[in-house]
Amino acid sequence: MRGFIVDNTISRFGHDFYRYFSDRLRDTSALDFNLVIRERPSARWGSLVWVEHENRTLFRSFLQPNASELKQLAEQAADQVQDSIAKQKIELFLQNSTDMAKDEL
């Protein structure tokens, strides 16, 4: 099953980031992949938010509690993640691995 964006955020800012991120991604791509958005809140630094695809971190950033540009940051993150996934697909397609299994690389 593909097309899921799992929200593992904790704070209100993390949930807002997830909402803006997922809206942007759903508007711009076909979602033939799964993503997980995770958050680690910190009283000192804000919240560390990262996006994972197949256990690889594609985006990581700190969110400040007073971030007025949260929507812009989330949309930039969605574009960056979409580009990274497209590059992964191209690399996988062009990779010549006829004699090796994927886990042996």
Image (tube, grey):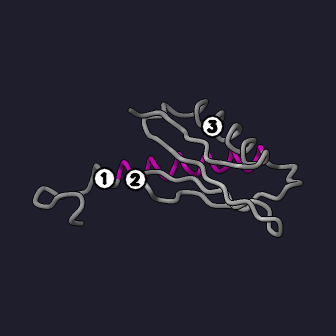
Q: Residue furthest bottom?
A: 44
Mark 2 to mark 3 CA distance (whole Å): 20 Å
Mark seen at residue 67? none
Q: Position of residue 50 (x, y in %)?
A: 61, 57
Q: Nearer the viewer, residue 65 or 58?
A: 65
Q: On the image, numbered disc 1 is attached to which residue?
A: 92
Q: Secondary structure at mark 1?
A: helix
Please identify the quarter of the rendering in which residue 15 is found: top right
Q: Please give left or right for residue 80 compared with residue 74 in the image.
A: left
Q: Which residue is rendered at x = 71% and y = 39% of the image?
A: 20
Instruction: Quadrant for the N terminus, please.
Output: top left
Instruction: Quadrant for the C terminus, please.
Output: bottom left
Mark seen at residue 22? 3
Q: Please give left or right for residue 33 compared with residue 91 in the image.
A: right
Mark 1 to mark 2 CA distance (whole Å): 6 Å
Q: Overall secondary structure of the magenta stretch? A: helix
The amino acid type, in three-letter code, at marker 1 is: Leu
Q: Position of residue 88 (x, y in %)?
A: 40, 53
Please identify the quarter of the rendering in which residue 45 is found: bottom right
Q: Earlier in the sequence, mark 3 or mark 1?
A: 3
Q: On the image, numbered disc 2 is attached to which residue?
A: 88
Residue 65 part of the magenta-drawn span: no
Q: Secondary structure at mark 2?
A: helix
Q: Please give left or right for residue 90 compared with residue 62 in the image.
A: left
Mark 3 to mark 1 CA distance (whole Å): 25 Å
As displayed, is residue 61 above or below residue 25? below
Q: Which residues are magenta?
A: 71-90
Q: Earlier in the sequence, mark 2 or mark 3?
A: 3
Q: Nearer the viewer, mark 3 or mark 1?
A: 3
Q: Are marks 1 and 2 in contact (CB under 8 Å)?
A: yes
The amino acid type, in three-letter code, at marker 2 is: Gln
